[in-house]
Image (tube, rainbow, N blue to C red):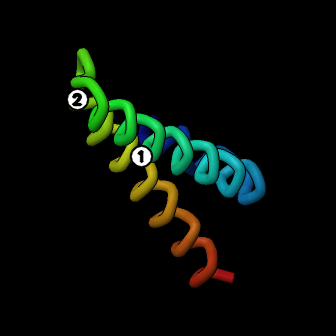
Amino acid sequence: MKIAEIRELKTEELVERLASLKKEVNQLEINHSISPLDNPAQIKQVRRTIARINTELRNRELNK
């Protein structure tokens, strides 16, 4: 997910997306510890998306 797509979403949608991505990265890490994933870089992508969403939420909080 790109930053332009994140900026278009409402705050409530970002919070929901953040929660689902956190669950997803947790599940990916568990699956990867049991048996290697086909694409372990997927964990990195999800973590970066979480960071982008957190950054946008923080910017919105500061700009109120």
Name the outermost residue toward the front. 34
Quadrant of the rendered image containing residue 36: top left
Q: Reading the chain from its start, which is encountered first: label 1 or label 2? A: 2
Q: Do callouts 1 and 2 mark residues in contact (Cβ within 8 Å)?
A: no
Is residue 20 shown above or below 14? above
Quadrant of the rendered image containing residue 62: bottom right
Name the outermost residue toward the top. 38
In depth, the one of 27 and 17 nearer the eye is 27
Give x and y (percent) for residue 2.
Answer: 42, 38
Q: Residue at x 74, y 52 (%)?
A: 10
Residue type, numbered disc 2: Pro
Determine whether the residue tagged by mark 1 lies in a helix, strand or loop. helix
Q: Quadrant of the C terminus?
A: bottom right
Q: Residue at x 22, y 31 (%)?
A: 41
In depth, the one of 34 and 52 nearer the eye is 34
Question: Quick check: 12 left or right of 34?
Answer: right
Q: Which mark is residue 40?
A: 2
In depth, the one of 25 and 50 nearer the eye is 25
Is residue 58 shown above or below 27? below
Give x and y (percent) for residue 5.
Answer: 54, 38
Residue type, numbered disc 1: Thr
In the picture of the structure, the residue carrying the numbered disc 1 is 49
Give x and y (percent) for residue 3.
Answer: 44, 46
Is residue 57 shown above or below 8? below
